[in-house]
Image (tube, helix red, strand yellow):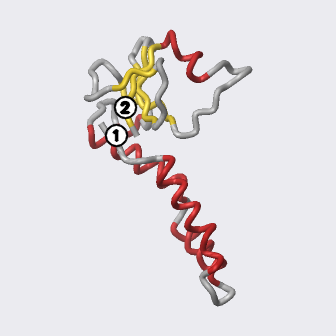
Amino acid sequence: MKLYQLQASNFQTFFGTPEQPIQRESTRIIAQRPDCSAFLLLSDLTDPVLELQTSIPSGFDFTYCQEWGLTITEEVIHRVIRDLRQKDYGTIGDQLDVLWHAMDDGTMAKVEPFYSNIQSVKTRWTKWDR
């Protein structure tokens, strides 16, 4: 994942309109300027309208999870990615249930769906790379 800034003037270009949205599955808005003139995104995409950030810019309020506060730090960015991964993985009980049913026939041949799900989450929400 990389940290990008998106100007409000390019929001529609990147995300589309309510009538014709552009799906950005591995992109999450995590902060915005108080006047909504720009947004900070975590994404693995590259797009000409996205401005790569090599450090955390000032003047943004953290909006991904307001109960965590308004300040964006490197630890907060890592925490967001961990949270996104955790939500996509599901509970450990659900994961173990999938694994159990995959192995229930006495072989490991059916473990592929379990592995594929875990791998897709790891690919979708990669660690923050500046």
If you read the primary sequence from the N terminus, does the residue marked by circle 1 or circle 2 appear first?
2
Mark 1 in CB contact with mark 2 (< 8 angstroms): yes
Determine the residue positioned at 42% across, 47% down. Answer: 126
- Give the amino acid type for the residue marked by disc 2 in the picture: Leu
Q: Quadrant of the C terminus?
A: top left
Which mark is in front, 1 or 2? 2
Closest to the observer, 86 or 44: 44
- Give the amino acid type for the residue marked by disc 1 in the picture: Ile
Determine the residue positioned at 36% across, 39% down. Answer: 68
Image mark count: 2
Residue 64 shows which numbered tag? none
Closest to the observer, 110 or 72: 110
Q: Secondary structure at mark 1?
A: helix
Picture quadrant where residue 55 is located: top left
* Residue where numbered disc 1 is placed: 77
* Residue where numbered disc 2 is placed: 3
Crowd rating for badge 2 (residues with CA inside 10 Å; few <14, some 14–19, many 20+):
many
Relative to 96, say whether 129 is above or below.
above
Estimate the x, y position of residue 90 in percent, counting from the top left. Answer: 55, 59
Q: Quadrant of the N terminus?
A: top left
Q: Secondary structure at mark 2?
A: strand
Relative to 65, say whether 14 is above or below.
above
Estimate the x, y position of residue 3 in percent, counting from the top left. Answer: 37, 31
